[in-house]
Image: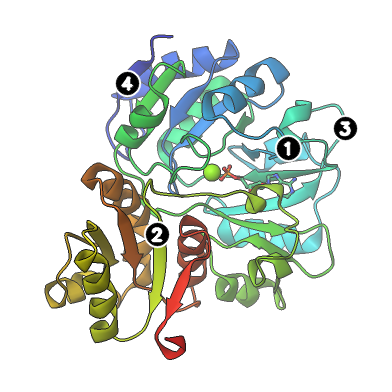
Amino acid sequence: MKTIYWTVDKNVDDVRNYPQVKEAAELLTNNEVVAFPTETVYGLGANACSNEATAKIFVAKGRPSDNPLIVHIADQQQLKQLVEQIPNQAEKLMTAFWPGPLTIIFKKKQGMLADNVTAGLDTVAIRVPDHPLALRLIRESQLPLAAPSANCSGKPSPTSAKHVLDDLNGKVAGILDGGETGVGVESTVVDCTTDIPVILRPGGITKEELEAVVGEVTLDPALKNANEQPKSPGMKYKHYAPNAPMILLDGSREWLQQQIDQERAQGKKVGLLTTEEATTFYKADVILPCGNRADLTTIAHSLYDVLRAFNEADVDIIFSEVFPYEGVGLAIMNRLEKAASHQWRKQKES
Ligand code: AMP
Ligand code: MG
């Protein structure tokens, strides 16, 4: 398949972009799949009401069929057509965070969505993205768009159209290039079908921000213990993985340098994920700064680009610094732990 590539002006919603967006929307109404930017990562969109269309997402990504998709809508009017009820807590969260990086799980209305969007569950995950191009595309197509991240399953999510092209060229009908995404990690997924909302996947909106709006919010136990069965099917899969094995290092800079030196002494090409303020301290084969430790949102923004860059640098092993499990740090550490398949080295144990 020849993939159409449209370049559109970043973050503007005006006539300069309309012809490209219109063409992309036409493909979507014809049940084709199109990648588009959101404020979190690039999404791979398809008509959420068509099994034929959404099946193409699973094929293009190589996504396991039991992993349901997030449905992207433009406003709350569209929501009422898709869900059975809107609980109070969900209402408050939508008012506070939509459009934005918050996905809410609702009881689904029967017979509206393609079966493979919800993978056999009686619930559906929905959000309103905070990106003018994404919103224009949804409105233009007049469809709810099922859209997982636009990467090959298991790989780091795409934060630029180049990442999408690297993974999906020739496998999707089109890619709408609207520049780099902002937040850099995916949306927070919160289940509002229970009395107390439960975070199933940490993301762009923090637990602290949610609690400021609805009071108590809990974490799915699987987020704290890798042996628990997660409530969100997608969370059980290996994810975000660079090609080389990755190990998380928890210790002083001097101790980290010792770990690097040991591997290099065995002839390995060692990559290090660190932050801007520490790069000059270390000696390794490939040192990639990922944002600034003083502001965790900068780390989230760059994380996937850095994980992908290690593939291009062709390292044998990647070491990564670790970050506090607070604010967006919770999402960052969730992604890093998965990227590293939970492999840690801790100074105090050595
Ligand atoms: P992705 O679109 O690749 O960022 O992943 C979407 C995430 O939302 C995955 O972890 C899915 O398992 C999760 N998800 C989607 N729909 C549901 C649902 N109905 N219940 C629980 N988790 C869901
Ligand atoms: Mg994904």
First of labels 4, 1 by sequence position: 4
Answer left or right for 217 relative to 345.
right
Q: Is residue 108 visible?
A: yes
At label 1, the amino acid type is: Asp
**Disc 3 element:** loop
At label 4, the amino acid type is: Trp
Instruction: Indicate which disc residue 6 carries.
Output: 4
Answer left or right for 253 relative to 195.
left
Seen in the picture, residue 46 relative to 226 is either above or below; the reply is: above
At label 3, the amino acid type is: Gln
Q: Residues within 10 Å of mark 4 (few under 14, many from 20)?
A: some
CA gap between label 1 and label 3 equals 19 Å
First of labels 1, 2 by sequence position: 1
Q: Quadrant of residue 248?
A: bottom left
> Which one is nearer the viewer's eye here, 141 or 341?
341
- Residue indicated by mark 2: 246
Image quarter in which the C terminus is found: bottom left
Seen in the picture, residue 197 relative to 281 is either above or below; the reply is: above
CA gap between label 4 and label 1 equals 32 Å
First of labels 4, 2 by sequence position: 4
**Can you give x and y, in whole percent of width and height, for residue 56 in the image?**
60, 20
- Residue indicated by mark 3: 110
**Can you give x and y, in whole percent of width and height, for residue 72 in the image?**
60, 38
**Can you give x and y, in whole percent of width and height, for residue 259 in the image?**
29, 75
